[in-house]
């Protein structure tokens, strides 16, 4: 068999959505597909039950409903269907009123900027999509606070041209996420210091009757949008979490939802070779051998997809990184994700990827069309010939992708390529839906619950315990009127608490030095 025939045997096109999969340097074999036929069928059957409304998160006895967000007709009850459809219309109407100036700021000016406060999926999704679809013609500019770092919060607030014309979106599914609450408090204080009425600039996205929902209602915030217990943060991009900032920026939310909807229909097909998510999940299964000791390096050859690796880090690692499987067996499963973008990261990663330990495979993303919006070409002719023979900058980008893939292949380093025709609302929606389904199928293959996150909850609990030690230490320092030295307080804390106490006192002492240095 010649090389081109081998390539064709491992190149799968899906003309319905314009996306292709290239497994050329990580080829399938007929024997592998035959051996995994039954497991693939079970994965699809399990997914169909999930979409139909079966309990898919047994640890929390919870439905999993992110597929209903872009196709409410799939929801298992009329109540859920109505709630999702109503919320979509509410988002569209609110964005239209902001754009028309019907809803104005507290100083009776039009809104020009968005400041989104969230963490995890509440920030990574809007951050990834906002960067991918950003244009000079955006109706509102988006900035995001995604941490409780006071320096980062202050820098983001300072970067906003005018708080007077800024709409603040606070996102917390539970309504009690500490990092988001801290960001909200600091931002509200900034509005107060600027003599602005914060509630007339604020919008909440949260579960109904959460602490945030009640607070926003009591304070008279502009609007409250709701998400549901069946929607996880890392799969919430087709809910208000992603749709509201997107609609406010001015991109086509219906096209975005259609892309996700079309991909969902494609990735529920029972035939492996006609199902792109099943193919990708099986390829990952083969490349990892169902183990967690290989990483996936994500290299999108498009600046607009620079944040894709961060988005996929959470989607894959929070979903698949589990100590136990569904049978209670200790498996310590997971798939580590890292990467940035090509060709930039060729200078940072490829040396080790080619010549270092072979403990990874690469996921390339190729985009065939150079332009996103023609308006971006006002000052730059992207078709400019940079080398004789009609070679453009975009041709070089593809050349570096092809060269990198070939260089890795020469050393037996395997890769997969997802090929997009262009960057658009439709293709980004489809890409998100593709990887959501890949995670669900792969989790089925390795028998883990990909819809819970016990490790995250453990971290939150430990953080709360550390803050309680800080409160006790501060109280003792005040009562004893003593210096914040470890020796002065050690006896009041258990052996298990003392290392944490030392770190806390280190920060307190540094803060005191800073205060007295001004």
Image: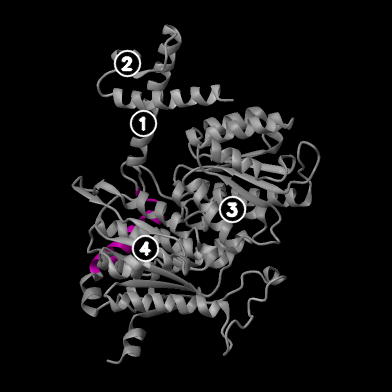
Name of the residue lying farthest toward the right:
108
- Closer to the observer: label 1 or label 2? 2
Q: Quadrant of the N terminus?
A: bottom left
Query: Is 346 placed above or below 222 here?
Result: below
The quadrant where residue 162 appears: top right
Give the CA distance from mark 2 to mark 3: 53 Å
Front one among 42 and 126: 126
**From which residue to which does the magenta span run?**
38-56
Disc 4, SS: strand
Identify the residue at image location x=53%, y=42%.
118
| Side of 496 where 418 appears, left or right | right
Residue that label 1 marks: 461
Disc 2, SS: helix
Residue 10 rendering spot, x and y as whole percentages: 34, 80
Q: How many marks?
A: 4
Residue that label 3 marks: 243
Dot 2 crowding, Cα within 10 Å, few <14, some 14–19, many 20+: few
- Closer to the observer: label 2 or label 4? 2
Mark earlier in primary sequence (3, 4): 3
Residue 406 rendering spot, x and y as whole percentages: 36, 79
- Closer to the observer: label 4 or label 1? 4
Dot 4 crowding, Cα within 10 Å, few <14, some 14–19, many 20+: many
Front one among 102 and 476: 476
């Amino acid at each position: 068999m010649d090389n081109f025939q081998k390539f064709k045997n491992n190149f799968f096109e899906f003309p319905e959505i314009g996306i292709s999969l290239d497994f050329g340097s990580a080829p399938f074999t007929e024997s592998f597909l035959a051996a995994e036929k039954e497991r693939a069928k079970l994965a699809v059957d399990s997914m169909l039950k999930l979409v139909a409304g079966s309990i898919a998160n047994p640890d929390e006895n919870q439905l999993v409903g992110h597929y209903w967000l872009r196709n409410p007709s799939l929801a298992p009850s009329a109540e859920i269907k109505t709630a999702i459809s109503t919320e979509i219309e509410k988002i569209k109407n609110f964005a239209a009123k902001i754009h028309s100036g019907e809803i104005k700021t507290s100083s009776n000016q039009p809104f020009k900027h968005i400041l989104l406060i969230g963490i995890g999926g509440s920030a990574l999704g809007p951050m990834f999509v906002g960067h991918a679809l950003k244009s000079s013609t955006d109706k509102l500019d988006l900035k995001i606070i995604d941490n409780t770092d006071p320096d980062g919060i202050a820098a983001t607030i300072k970067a906003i041209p005018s708080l007077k014309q800024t709409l603040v979106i606070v996102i917390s599914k539970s309504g009690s996420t500490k990092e988001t609450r801290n960001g909200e408090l600091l931002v509200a204080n900034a509005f107060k210091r600027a003599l602005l009425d914060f509630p007339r600039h604020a919008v909440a996205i949260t579960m109904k009757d959460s602490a945030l929902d009640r607070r926003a209602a009591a304070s008279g915030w502009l609007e409250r949008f709701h998400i549901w217990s069946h929607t996880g943060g890392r799969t919430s991009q087709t809910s208000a979490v992603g749709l509201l900032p997107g609609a406010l920026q001015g991109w086509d939310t219906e096209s975005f939802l259609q892309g996700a909807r079309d991909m969902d229909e494609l990735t529920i097909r029972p035939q492996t070779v006609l199902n792109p998510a099943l193919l990708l999940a099986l390829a990952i299964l083969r490349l990892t051998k169902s183990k967690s000791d290989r990483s996936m390096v994500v290299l999108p050859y498009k600046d607009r997809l620079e944040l894709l690796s961060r988005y996929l880090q959470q989607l894959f690692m929070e979903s698949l990184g589990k100590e136990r499987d569904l049978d209670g067996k200790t498996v310590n499963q997971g798939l580590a994700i890292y990467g940035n973008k090509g060709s930039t990261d060729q200078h940072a990663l490829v040396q080790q990827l080619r010549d270092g330990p072979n403990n990874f495979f690469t996921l390339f993303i190729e985009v065939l069309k150079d332009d996103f919006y023609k308006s971006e070409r006002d000052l730059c002719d992207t078709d400019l010939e940079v080398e004789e023979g009609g070679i453009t900058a975009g041709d070089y980008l593809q050349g570096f992708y092809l060269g990198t893939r070939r260089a890795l292949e020469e050393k037996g380093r395997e890769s997969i390529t997802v090929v997009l025709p262009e960057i658009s609302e439709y293709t980004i929606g489809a890409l998100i839906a593709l990887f959501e389904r890949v995670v669900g199928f792969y989790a089925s293959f390795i028998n883990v619950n990909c819809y819970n996150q016990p490790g995250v909850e453990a971290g939150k609990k430990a953080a709360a315990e550390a803050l309680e030690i800080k409160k006790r230490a501060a109280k003792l320092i005040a009562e004893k009127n003593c210096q914040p030295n470890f020796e002065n307080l050690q006896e009041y804390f258990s052996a298990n608490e003392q290392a944490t106490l030392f770190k806390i006192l280190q920060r307190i002492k540094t803060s005191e030095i800073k205060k007295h240095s001004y």
